[in-house]
Image (tube, grey):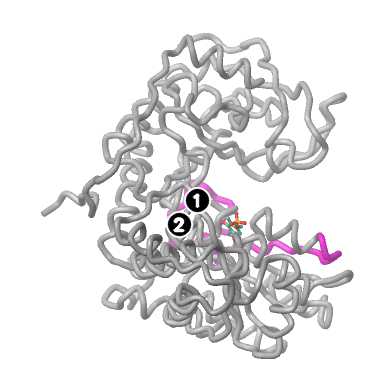
Amino acid sequence: MKTIIEPFRIKSVEPIRMTTRAERERLIEAAHLNLFALHADDVLIDLLTDSGTGAMSSEQWAAVMRGDESYAGSPSWYRFEEAVQRVFGLEHVIPTHQGRAAEHLLFGELGGPGKVIPNNTHFDTTRANAEDTGAVALDLPCGESLDTASDFPFKGNMDLDALRAALVEHGDAVPLVMITVTNNAGGGQPVSLANLRAVKALCDEFGKPLYVDACRFAENAYLIQQREPGQRERSLEDIVRDGFALAEGCTMSAKKDGMVNIGGFLAVRDAELARRLRERLVVTEGFATYGGMAGRDLEAVAQGLAEVLRPEYQEYRHASIRYVVERLHERGIPVVRPAGGHAIFLDAKRFLPHLPWHQFPGQALAIELYLEGGVRSCEIGSLMLGATDPATGAGKPAARELVRLAIPRRTYTQSHMDYVLEVVEAVWQRRDAIAGVEIAEAPPVLRHFTGKYRRLAAQGAAR
Ligand SMILES: *Cc1c(COP(=O)(O)O)cnc(C)c1O
């Protein structure tokens, strides 16, 4: 059969509240043009993030009922520990309430003032936790990652020359090398096994441990299977084991490829490091056999780690993302290609070329997607990552102006994706008339969460 179907049927449904355009005009004005300030039940299709927003399976809900809430030594913990060891091959497992808590523990032990931590691209919480210890977070993405139009298959790769140069320059100041799979901040693009091996070879040459930010490990394995020569016949489990055999440890947000709404962990090979991490764990998260999670959450992750590696699940997930990306591309709508693992990224710089970066084309586009069809997306451009002085407008743009449509796991169907396509196309038809925005009020850090914006007067002619 040619049609790739959702590999599940639906047992419990959650109604979506429909809104009219007039209502959305009013709602977005009341939110000061900031999509984070909307009430979620005023959103029709919520593509703000794929983090913790997915649906659990009936087997996961059954596991939740089995959850044992013993403070120490719960059987749910042993099932969780065994699942992590089986999938990743890392012996010492430390449960945390989500990914950033794992980062906080790891960098608390290995970071510190004067340290330099290279990564293909730090996710924002990873950077914040590294910097919080006084360390410098270095992003070393491969050169191909900057061209949103090329079809290079592994734009998540680390720049190997830049990594070597960083290891030579910073020497003893580098406590570890980290690599993020898939590269979330870099467009959900995968890292190849060949690149992982080359990074590991450099780590060995300079005597550094390699850690993996494992949030989307299964999506990365699927993209390796599909795109890397010689991998097509191998199982996802084998590919994951190959990749993590190179690592000294990993941090994980189970809200992504753990297929749950909350949870995470840190896993390491070194027993002595694990002992020190557990000492910190008990102070900030909880006892070693539950960390930051309830017994029922441990059960749901253990089950989720098995389900995420099922080939039919990965095939469906990537097919629906690829479907949207390819349709948009056929219609000439600028979108990052090839499709990444968890989201569709519109290139707002090419979508709204009449808007300079300081009129925030990504935010202007995200607002229009909401007005047009109630679709909530997320700007990843100069508003989130750039720097501007609201008084003078002076500042620095981000490298790219993107709008991310993140796809929650097992939550929306093909017709929802068709609807999203229709919304993007309708906005594309009237793109010339779309005005930019300016910042009315914003805090100095992480301004995209709480900032307030104003619309500028439209300049172009209506199409
Ligand atoms: C989500 C994410 C994190 C942080 O995890 P939280 O569970 O949100 O704390 C870290 N790294 C990457 C790549 C992520 O996508």
Question: Residue at 62% across / 69% down in the picture?
Answer: 291
Residue 376 percent coordinates (x, y)? 49, 32
Disc 2 target residue:
260
Task: Examine the structure image and report whether residue 150 is included in the region drawn in magenta.
Answer: yes
Label 2 vs 1, first from the N-terminus: 1
Q: Is residue 276 above or below residue 300?
A: below
Q: Amino acid at mark 1?
A: Gly
Disc 1 target residue:
52
Residues marked 2 and 1 touching at CB (< 8 Å): yes
**Which element carries disc 2, helix, strand or loop?**
loop
Q: Amino acid at mark 2?
A: Val
Q: Which segment is the magenta one?
A: 132-158
Residue 417 percent coordinates (x, y)? 33, 37
Foreground: 177 or 407?
Answer: 407
- Horizontal arrangement in the rendering, residue 343 relative to residue 111 (left or right): left
Foreground: 260 or 116?
Answer: 260
Task: Examine the structure image and report whether residue 408 is included in the region drawn in magenta.
Answer: no
Q: Image quadrant of residue 36?
A: top right
